[in-house]
Amino acid sequence: MFEDLKTWKIWASFLQHWGVSKYVAIILETVGPMNIIGAQVMYVSYPLFKAIIPEVHLMAMTKLLEDQYKRNSFIELLREDTVVEQP
């Protein structure tokens, strides 16, 4: 989890900047087990996404969708008022 924390903080800051972090948290919680299907879609679509999204972000997203513990940790991060990016 800790190796993905920097990436999660980048995502959380971006989502908070646009004011949608709480909505993304609700969606991740509501979808529940369907997140595994999302992870499989990420694996299949990897060749398309890798041209526009850094590999580190793709792998972090896939792992997040597959692992309920990581997903819950990211949801907690999204629900924080502000996320300070680490240098």
Image (spheres, helix red, strand yellow):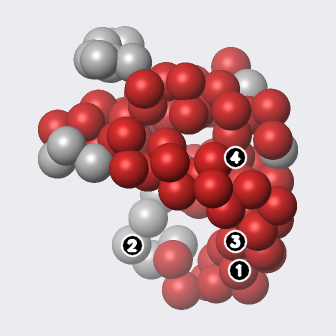
Contact (Cβ within 8 Å) of mark 1 with mark 2: no
Nearer-the-camera pick, 61 or 56: 61
Callout 2 amino acid: Ile
**Where is residue 46 shown, x and y percent of the image?**
64, 77
Crowd class of label 1 (few under 14; some 14 to 19; many from 20; radius 10 Å): few
Crowd class of label 4 (few under 14; some 14 to 19; many from 20; radius 10 Å): many
Looking at the rendered image, the disc whose residue lies closer to the viewer, 1 or 2, is 1
Looking at the rendered image, the disc whose residue lies closer to the viewer, 2 or 3, is 3
Nearest to N terminus: mark 4 or mark 2: 2
Residue located at (67% from left, 62% from top): 31
Residue of label 1: 41
Q: Is residue 22 visible?
A: yes
Q: Quadrant of residue 12?
A: top left
Callout 3 amino acid: Gly
How far apart are the two marked residues, 1 and 4, measured between alpha carbons? 13 Å
Residue of label 2: 52
Tell whether 87 sits left or right of 1. Answer: left
Residue of label 3: 38
Contact (Cβ within 8 Å) of mark 4 with mark 2: no
Secondary element at tag 2: loop
Nearest to N terminus: mark 2 or mark 3: 3
Position of residue 48 relative to residue 86, above or below, is below
Nearer-the-camera pick, 24 or 9: 24
Contact (Cβ within 8 Å) of mark 3 with mark 1: yes
Callout 4 amino acid: Leu
How far apart are the two marked residues, 3 and 1, measured between alpha carbons? 5 Å
Q: Quadrant of residue 48?
A: bottom right
Residue of label 4: 64
